[in-house]
Amino acid sequence: MKKYLILLVCLLIMIPAFVTANGAQEEKEDGKPVVGLIMKSLANEFFMAMEEGAKAYAEEDGTFELMTMGMNSETDFDSQVNAVDSLITQGVDLIVLAPADSAGMVAPVKRAIDAGVTVINFDVTLDKEALKAAGLPEEFLFVGPDNTDGAEMVGNYLGETLGSGGKVFIIEGNPGADNAKQRKNGFMKAVENHNLELLASNTAHWETEEANTLMTNLLTKHPDVQGVMCANDSMALGVVRALEAAGRSDVQVVGFDNIPAVKDLIMNDKMLATVHMDGAEMAILAFNAGFEILDGKRENLGWVQSPLILADKDFFK
Amino acid sequence: MAVDNIIELKNISLFFPGVKALDSVDLDVRKGEIHILLGENGAGKSSLVKTICGVYKQNNGAMILDGETYSPQNPLAAIQSGIRVVYQEFNLLSYLSIAENIFFEKLPRKNGLVDFKRLNADARKLMDKVGLNQVSPKAPVESLGVAQMQLVEIAKALSGDSRVLILDEPTATLMPDEIDTLFDLLKTLRDEGVSIIYISHRLNEIFRIGDRVSVLRNGKMVGTHPAEELDIKSIVKMMVGRSMENEYPFDETVTPGDPLLEVNNLIFKGSPHPKSFTLRKGEILGIAGLVGSGRTETMRALFGADPKDAGEVILHGNTLNIQSPRNAVQSGLCLLTEDRKQQGLILDMNCVENTTITDLGSVSSRGFLNKQAEREATEKQIREMNIKTPGIDQKTLYLSGGNQQKILIGKWLFRDSEVFIFDEPTRGIDVGAKYEIYLLLWKLAAMGRGIIMVSSDLPELMGVCHRIAVFSDGKITGELERKDFDAESILTLSYKEYLHA
Amino acid sequence: MSEKSRLRSVVNIFLKEVGIGVVLLVLVVAFSLGAPRFFSIINVANIFTQISINTVIAVGMTFVILLGGIDLSVGSVLALCSIIAGKILVNPELSFGMAIVLSVLVSVVSGMLIGLINGFISETWKIHSFIVTLGMLNIARGLALQISQSRTIFNFPKAFNDFGTTTYFGVLPAIFLIALILVILGSIILRNTVFGRMIFAIGNNEESVRLSGHNVKFYKILAYTICGGTVGIATIMYMLRMSIASPILGVGFELNAIAAVVIGGTSMSGGKGSLVGTFLGASIMGVLNNGLLLIGMGDFARQIVTGVIIILAVILDTYRTRFSAMLND
């Protein structure tokens, strides 16, 4: 008996780690539309900031009820499916979803639409093939940034700084992730634009320590490197630290995301620039697109681009 | 040539690095005979058996099975050739039923599923044959006693078409009536044409069932003789290369002194009858009874190895509060379990580590081990106890059964315990080593220690003990002083509680 | 001791301690030939840095695995400790010295406390440590995220960051020295103390040890506590190396540590193994990761080759065990 009790307590403690659901329980009686915001991992500062911004907006706006849900990890696809299903059951009006799996989330989205719920896809696009297969339009509305463009923008900035022929590394994100592929493509365009010499392009799976190890090893192999393009800022942190350890202040680093930790690095010239993406702003764009659809003012098709801004020293001043 | 030999071994040699396990051994076993294989531990019996049943491949020599060359590549091939072995260490899956264990290799099927009806019916037949008639074939093996497990092993060996049945010390844990049943069974099988190779340390059994006897010593075949031409003396001489005067030593000069340990009204789970007994200084107290009569369980509860519900344990007049083996050991008790390998030795560790484990405090200071002191203490122990090992760094796994038992005794001597509880101390040990163990018991008694010895070997108990307490179905049904020792009265007491059940 | 048995024991010791070292040697030679910069002082120092954290976690893991247990929570506990220690380190109210001492102390004590809880639950209710530490993996990660609100902590004092990149004599990084000291200390504990003897004995045959009159539960819980303590130390090393603390770091660290322990010849069922082996195991993993990149192998191929070599190393180990058993039979 004791044994089960302890197990139960452990399970209870663990629940918040799996799915964090906050916000309103069906308060439809006052006629306000209910919006469910399903994000990826709340362990990611980007989504944490997004959640805070979205909640603040909902409170200020006052015309809708917001429920937010975050997952355990970036790839926690099962919990996302469960989250969509439970929102359908609760009868929300609008689901705003950042898919953890581009193809896998299409089926639950289809279920939601069939149940009469409007779904807005944001942050990461749903897979076109899968959409088609599910009988949904290929150009299903997407609210989000153009990762390729953003990466090219910050890559170009690095290229201008180094000049033609500059020698660079690309530190890639998780090989399976769409945004990792798009960011790499953007970096590759910048390499072409500025005639840069690409010495190495390897993945560090979005992780600081792995990027640090990778950078240290790449430095041994190619000590002549001049610039590094990182597919996210967490990896840029590891890269900058590797350069510090090697006593190399001559290598320029750019990143992506603008997490709080990089501000000081950019201000102290340890990093050149990053790409600022405002998660809350993106979520708000998605909400408003959703309300327009609910009001019949818009079709659920196309791409609402959320802005990406180059964040260099001037940006933070 | 008319083939009347089922299996012939010619000039078999088996080498391990540095050891000649078998040295040009010849052996022939006739169809329908019970062939006794004797030898001290380490004489090569196991190696010989393992060669016959395909575990080892001989380096030299040939085997002929029923007139044809026989060269099993693995144990399965041997089983398919009709050679079955019942090992001393059981090979059963304890959570499965008896029937499933017996037919594990070839469960009867119907429509792709196990045909339990047929399985249980087939098992029932074999179980009746081996005398397991009071138990259901559906009962899990873990619910059985050691003796019954042995019978399941034999039933399993009979489940196929066995031409040669090899039994390794089958009677070690059996009670006299169980032995009788087994022997009747073996004789029936023999008369049906099955050849039986029978390994035992109980020399008196030879004359009850053996047709011919072969003796191994140091990997060599000493000789094969018809059983009726031999007597115990000549067999022992063949085995040890010298004659042994007395099988059981008894030292008249050691007389029990004051009470040392008193156990009053001990009760534990599954054994509601209060058990009380007293042990005196310098006394060897024997515990007799059937397997499953609560002997082992009582000793474990006394020692704190299993929880007890009630009961008083008094040592030197002081009441002890024993909640765990740790309490018992600190009070001066020690338990040498029946299962030396699982609950006694740490097989993968060496003689030193096994010896000093009972009292690491005495060979360490501030938590740091004094390895030199450990080695010296162990060397002394090994010398005094005449333990045969290539060195103190040898893993105990590689020692013979008798030497393993001596290491176990040695580890408790190292701690200087006052009460030694032995559970089946001579099980699976050869004659020579048994004798040395008895001498050790007497040495302990002479030092004023108290000794409790649980044993299923009645002659051994009667030969070695001052006093015998008899267990029957969880009760102590009687105590006998040495002058009153008599096999019949001990057996009567052993069965007392089972008769009116 | 006869000549033969002396030879046998020499061969045994060689196989036992050096067997896996041969694999490491082969890798080092191969990479030195394949990549000119591999055997340079700077690269050796880099590898030392890269294996340090895994080595320290694996030291603690060795204690637990020797008991036949496992600790899956180490990566998450590292994250949790880093958040707690990081918050102390950047606390403006504390003087620099105070902040350092406190953060190290709190990190180690937190790690030990979690290890103690793991061990206590596992031993008291006889739940396999796989389950208990799997639960703790989630609890610690959740707590780390909760406490930090999933924010990375940075801006550590400069002196702290500088110590993290210090290298003595050009080849001995400061954090590697910490790792080395822990390997040596751990080895001494395992080989020369009563506690170490108990670890091996319990790992081999817990019931025998209990019946020999020892408090098995105490020693087992102590081993988990030590494992937690090493994670606390590894946390500080991580912070020194990366100059950040984050609730999402350390994912998968448990598997790297287990791999190092097992490659190093420690048996997953307990009772057999050594910290020298563990250190060699961690070195093999570090050398592979570094060397394969330097000879220009792609990301995916590198992952495949690493996996193959882990399995090969363990297969080799079974041959070693079989061979030495044959010698003794």
Image (cartoon, rainbow, N blue to C red):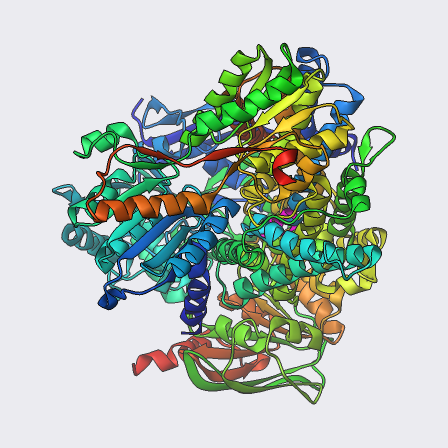
Q: Is residue A99 left or right of residue C72?
A: left
Say above or below: A3 vs C259. Answer: below
The residue depicted at 84 percent of the width and 28 percent of the height is C170
Locate residue A281, reporting x and y percent. 44, 45
Q: Nearer the viewer, residue A58 or A46?
A: A58
> Toward which corner of the image does residue B393 lie, by quadrant?
top right
Residue B426 in view: no
Q: Nearer the viewer, residue C323 or C90?
A: C90
Residue A54 magenta: no
Magenta span main SS: helix
Q: Is residue A176 left or right of residue B115?
A: right
Left or right: A280 with respect to A289? right
Residue A15 percent across, percent down from the top left: 42, 60
Q: Nearer the viewer, residue A58 or B345?
A: A58
Q: Position of residue C47 (x, y in %)?
A: 71, 29
Measured along the vertical axis of the image, is residue B385 above or below residue A2? above
Is any part of residue C237 visible from this angle? Answer: yes
Instruction: Please report the bounds of the magenta region as a residue range.
Output: C61-68
Q: How many marks?
A: 0
- Which quadrant would residue A176 be assigned to in this image? top left
Q: Is residue C65 magenta?
A: yes
The residue under the point 35% across, 58% down is: A67
| Quadrant into which the N terminus of chain C falls | top right
Picture quadrant of residue B171: bottom left
- The residue lying toward the viewer, choosing from B468 and A257, is A257
Q: Position of residue B320 (x, y in %)?
A: 65, 84
Name, please, the residue furthest toward the right: C169
The quadrant of the rendering that contains the C terminus of chain C is: top right
Q: Is residue A171 left or right of residue B35?
A: right
- Is residue C10 placed above or below A287 in the rendered structure? above
